[in-house]
Image: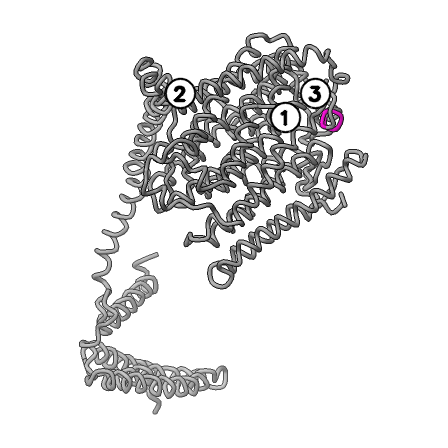
Amino acid sequence: MTIPLAAFIAVSALLFFVGAAGVLVRRNAVVILMCVELMLNAANLALVAFSRRLGLIDERGSVFVVFVFVVAAAEVAVGLAIVLAMYRNRPTVDLDEVQQMRG
Amino acid sequence: MVNLVWAIPALPLAAFFVNGLFGRRWLKQATGPIAAGAVGASALMATAVFLEVLGGRAQTTVVLYQWIGVGDFRIDIAALVDPLSAVMLLVVTVVSFLVHVYSIGYMSHDHGFHRFFTWLPLFVFAMLILVLADNYLLMFVGWEGVGVCSYLLIGYWFERHEPSVAAKKAFVMNRIGDWGFTIGMVTTFLVFGSMNFVDVFHRVGMASQAVLTVICLAFFLGACGKSAQLPLSSWLPDAMEGPTPVSALIHAATMVTAGVYLVARSTPLFEAAGPALPIVAAVGALTAIFAATIALVQNDIKRVMAYSTVSQLGYMFLALGVGAPVAAMFHLATHAFFKALLFLGSGSVIHGMQNEQDMRKMGGLRRKMPVTYWTMLVAGGALAAMPPLAGFWSKDEIVGAAFLHGDTLLWGVGVFTGALTAFYVTRAMVLTFHGEPRDQHLYDHAHESPAVMTLPLIVLAVGSVLAGFVGFPPEAGFIHGFIGPVVQLHGAAHHPEYTVIAALAAVSVAAGLIGIGIGLAMYRGRRPDPAAVARLTRPVYRLLVNKYFIDELYDRRFVAFFTGFGGVMSAFDVHIIDGFVNRLGWVVSAAGGGLRRAQTGVVGNYALSVVVGLLALMALYGGYAVGVLR
């Protein structure tokens, strides 16, 4: 029995919006970074699903997933570094309190 | 040597750069000897050039490089070396050198010493460019250069109010003259297709007399500005606010004679243009008597000399106007010596009297300052045209030329002005040096100036005696044979009978002696008493003391008008031009104030806008996919 493509896409979309909602509503910078990871992995899931479906015709989807892994790792490294620097400057990781760029 | 003529202006320029760059921090008091040394070397080289021209070298053009070359329009940085410029070179560099030496003593206590010796060689440089130029445009460069230096040096003590105002006045009045020079220069180019002296004078026949008259009158307006002739004369007396060596060098010996040099240089143009020369003669004669009458009643020693300078410059223009440019140049040279001496002597008196310039507080100084007294006596005699001093030969030639030209009225004005000149110079000498001291305190502290100041006085005094003999015998002397061929195109100068010349000279000398006699009677013998004379002629006296109310007239007619006009323009600028820009800035600022609310600085808000944008795009895409939108 094969799971239909639509199921994968549905899970992927669900994951993505859970992540997006997390980014929007949470205020803790670390949690927001985790939610970003959630969104990236939702995209990964969609990519491997399409790749699998297309089979031998096109496997680039799988290759892209590897790229996204790398980008995600780099993003977390940079993101956590920024959070750390921010925390050293003022002892908080609450993004609503970081408003120096307000116009 | 002539090929090295460019080194003559280059040396003062080098002194200007050295003193200007290193004067304040490092050189300090050394700036004086540096500038004097550079100008002295220039004077030596100018002498060499002069001797070479004297030795029969023909007119030479020394091209330094091509300045402008656009199609047919070609202007070179080039020097025209001929007898006329050689004489000017010699006079300018020698007098400049002596004034530089004198200034080392005169300015020694001034805190701006290095600044003074930065501007002074720059002036010499500009003056030499003016003299050497072989075309009107390069001459104009020097012309403006001396104007700037004059402005800087009149306003040398700019912390005080009067000098800065006087400097501004000199600059503005010179600008009016410069406007005339520019018009003349451009018209010359349009008519002749060249600004080069030699080319233009060769093509004089190409222009109609009307056009030539316009050109000449425009140039003459420029000359009036620079040489302080009516109606642009009133800046020169005010220029006495500058240091006295500046008055001697710039406002007596060199710069103010630039107008005379310009007209003498342009003689071929003026001779071809009919009505221009009589106007020059009339303006010159009018200025001569106008300034001499004011000088009669001035109490400031430098002001007397200033009005005297204006008057003597009027004589030079009178000479140019009656077709005697040689006499004008001759008087220019002798006047440079004796008037520079009178100014430097006045400076020596002022220096010894703790900067007191009012002759009413002097008197009896001849015992305290013998060198100053005797040298100034020589110069005063030369100014009063007493034989055999320099002024006698040159001024008499001018007055005689007016007579021989047939202008009996101008001759009469010249003789009468000669009597006035003799009177006011006698008055100045008696008030300063004779009689009893009128301010005992100042007198007690008065002292003769140091040798660095008196030596130039002595050299100039020797010049004031001997310079006249280059014009001996009258009408056929050395200077006539030397300059004559350059400035007198139409045949050789006329040689009148010596009896006529002697008779004319006798009349002039008699007039001068009468002036001296009245001066001595009034100020030594108090008979008639000067105060009584002033009371008796009260309206005239008031007119003269107030300088014919010329300044008041200009203030009311022109200055008030232009101040009002400037106010209108200023209001237009503030309310219309600036107003538009300010409104525009206000609109942009208000728009920015509204939009800045969008930048909350909260990362969550930015992320939300990204998601909203994403949803909008997806909705759009979905709409197309379903077919609701197309």
Q: Are marks 1 and 2 on the same chain?
A: yes
Q: Separation of disc 3 and disc 2 at Cα?
A: 34 Å
Magenta stretch, main secondary structure class: helix
Q: Residues within 10 Å of mark 2 (few under 14, many from 20)?
A: some
What residue span does the magenta drawing correspond to? B479-483
Q: Which mark is residue B474?
A: 3
Q: Amino acid at mark 3?
A: Pro
Q: Which mark is residue B388?
A: 1
Chain for numbered disc 1: B
Q: Are marks 3 and 2 on the same chain?
A: yes
Chain for numbered disc 3: B
Q: Amino acid at mark 2?
A: Met
Judge whether residue B148 can be spotted in this image.
Answer: no
**Quadrant of the snapshot with the C terminus of chain B:** bottom left
Q: Separation of disc 3 and disc 1 at Cα?
A: 12 Å
Task: Say how the picture is coloured.
Answer: one colour
Q: Position of residue B143 (x, y in %)?
A: 56, 36
Tell me the SS state at disc 1.
loop
Labels 3 and 1 touching (C-beta < 8 A): no
Q: Residues within 10 Å of mark 1 (few under 14, many from 20)?
A: some
Mark 3 or 2, which is nearer the eye?
2
Check disc 2 and report the residue beneath it.
B522
Q: Earlier in the sequence, mark 1 or mark 2?
A: 1
Q: Separation of disc 1 and disc 2 at Cα?
A: 26 Å
Tell me the SS state at disc 3.
loop
**Relative depth, front residue between A33 and B33:** B33
